[in-house]
Image (cartoon, rainbow, N blue to C red):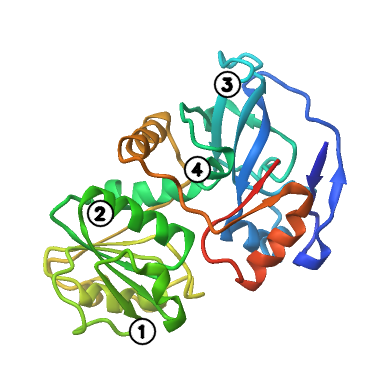
Amino acid sequence: MKAVVLDEITGANDVVISEVPIPEVRPGWVLVKIKAFGLNHSEKLLRLNEIRADYIQKPVIPGIECVGEIANPSDSGLAVGQKVVALMGGMGRSFNGSYAEYALLPRRIVFPIESDLPWEALGAAPETYFTAWGSLFECLRLTTEDTLLIRGATCALGYAAMQIAKALGCRVVATTHREEKLPLIAQADEALIDDGKLTGKISGVTKALDLVGPKSLRDTLTAVEKGAIVCQTGLLGGVYALNGFDPIKDIPNGVYLTGFFSNYPTQKVIDEIFAFLDDKKLKPKYGKVFDFENVKDAIFSQDNGSIDGKIVVKW
């Protein structure tokens, strides 16, 4: 089968499509014929840095999510041809992932779905919409009465969160740090340029999804109303830790801070997401679709940031 295989730091120009054996099925694992997968920042980090870590199985096929059909169900109880999504749980790091024709995956991260959406739309959904859903509902406990701030909204996760929140009936305040990207968040009720300081410039925010990360988190905590919940999910700001963070002084009284870690998907949540998409007649948002033979171009577009929204690769 065709696959992208990594064993060292690999820039976009060094990506090649290799021929490797189709994996042999074993108990507790299923073979998925991949139809589409989305590109994620996590995979970029793997290619450009994390691949050197001892805990990464090398060589490894990257890719933390996919959609496809069951090619061999092994002892899973699933059926050949059944439509599934798969994500996380070590995919593309501890074992081979989705940048391939087939993936051998543990049953625990493979979830049957019912959907009439085209494969490229489904390919934009698993990791992005699972993370948006968990951030909004498990962490922020979002309701129709909320005003939601999405900080760093011009990314795939930001678009998904905005789409879900608007479909729910929330008021949405969205930010970007680049003026030319304001049209991309026009769906928001209020679209703002983020110069690093929102405190005193916005009002009425009861829930905040911070996708910029530690670089902006202290300001997000002071920009929201008393009683608000702040969820830090993304790391777009390139700062990965809050050095010297003092929870007593840096979290205002009556404001709540949480974060969402997307490594533990469940069938229940996957079912909820696709039921919501179906009920609200929503189609997962994506920026551009590439055929697998052009996966190098897709990765190059990811590295140079030339595509707004989720990049999807399909077979």
Q: Which residue is drawn at 52% across and 40% down?
A: 122
**Residue 48 position in % (x across, y down):** 70, 66
Tell which tag, 1 or 4, sits nearer the viewer. 4
Cα–Cα gap, marks 1 and 4: 30 Å
Q: Which residue is drawn at 42% across and 69% down?
A: 184
Q: In which quarter of the image is the N terminus?
A: top right
**116 horizontally vs 198: left or right:** right
Give the amino acid type for the residue marked by disc 1 in the picture. Gly
Q: Residue at x 61, y 29 (%)?
A: 106
Residue picked out by circle 4:
126
Asked which secondary structure carries label 1, the reply is loop
Q: Which of marks 2 and 1 is nearer the N terminus?
A: 2
Nearest the viewer among 169 and 252 is 169
Give the amino acid type for the residue marked by disc 3 in the picture. Gln
Asked which secondary structure carries label 4, the reply is helix
Question: Of the numbered discs in the image, which one, if any, rests on residue 196?
Answer: 1
Asked which secondary structure carries label 2, the reply is loop
Please, is residue 188 above or below residue 104 in the view?
Answer: below
**38 horizontally vs 178: left or right:** right
Give the amino acid type for the residue marked by disc 2 in the picture. Leu
Give the amino acid type for the residue marked by disc 4 in the picture. Pro
Cα–Cα gap, marks 1 and 3: 47 Å
Disc 3 residue crowd, few under 14, some 14–19, many 20+, Cα 10 Å:
some
Residue picked out by circle 2:
140
Residues tagged 1 and 4 counted as in contact (Cβ below 8 A) = no
